[in-house]
Amino acid sequence: MRIRDRRAEDNPDINLVPMIDVILCLIIFFVITTTFDARSVLKLELPRADGERSEAKTRQLSLLINAEGRYFVDDREALRTDVESLKRTIVEVAGDDRERTVLIRADARTPWQAVITAYDALGQLGFRRIANATAPEQRPAAAEPAR
């Protein structure tokens, strides 16, 4: 009688395919649900103002100034906070188009000198259509009538 050794046939193997499927599903889920919004890059507290909202149909050039006085032209950050560095960054992003509207979004805590520097750089480059972004005024909620 021949006795077989069953231990030689009993090789455990790990199937990684289900784990890879789950990981790919998670990656796809996170990529789809992630928002790619320029406003989420910097947390700005805009100054408040009343007035009509401007609906410009042309492509705007966005100039963000954070609370520390750092400049961001669209998605590109200016290397330094001086006028020449800001002008170089604006020219790299905008090119030769000086008719574009420039939307300045400055934090409410931004030093005033940083905003003046932005205006100075835009004026030297020949931009004439400049707008300031503000947050809408928050009105107190009206009291509901008692029933």
Image (cartoon, rainbow, N blue to C red):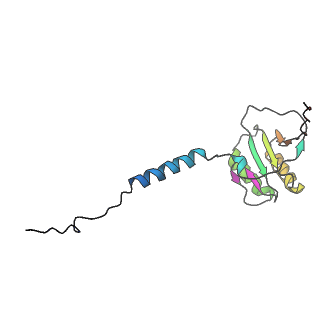
* Residue at the far left in the pictured view: 1
Q: In which image quadrant can residue 53 be found? A: top right
Between residues 8 and 6, which one lies in front from this camera angle? 6
Taking the magenta stretch, the answer to whether it contains residue 42 is no
Q: In which image quadrant can residue 143 be found? A: top right
Identify the residue shown where x is 80% and y is 47%.
105
Identify the residue shown where x is 57% and y is 44%.
32
Between residues 14 and 106, which one lies in front from this camera angle? 14
Identify the residue shown where x is 21% and y is 66%.
6
Image quarter hosting the N terminus? bottom left
Q: Position of residue 87 (x, y in %)?
A: 76, 52
Q: Position of residue 11 (x, y in %)?
A: 27, 65
* Residue at the far front in the pictured view: 1
Q: Which residues are magenta?
A: 70-76
Q: How many numbered circles does the render carry? A: 0
Q: Is residue 34 visible?
A: yes
Q: In which image quadrant can residue 69 be found? A: bottom right
Identify the residue shown where x is 22% and y is 64%.
9
Image quarter hosting the C terminus? top right
32 left or right, relative to 115:
left
Q: Is residue 128 visible?
A: no
- Whether 61 is drawn above or below 111: the answer is above
- Whether 114 is drawn above or below 123: the answer is below
Between residues 96 and 52, which one lies in front from this camera angle? 52
Q: Position of residue 30 (x, y in %)?
A: 57, 49
Q: Position of residue 68 (x, y in %)?
A: 81, 60
Between residues 3 and 44, which one lies in front from this camera angle? 3
50 left or right, relative to 80:
right
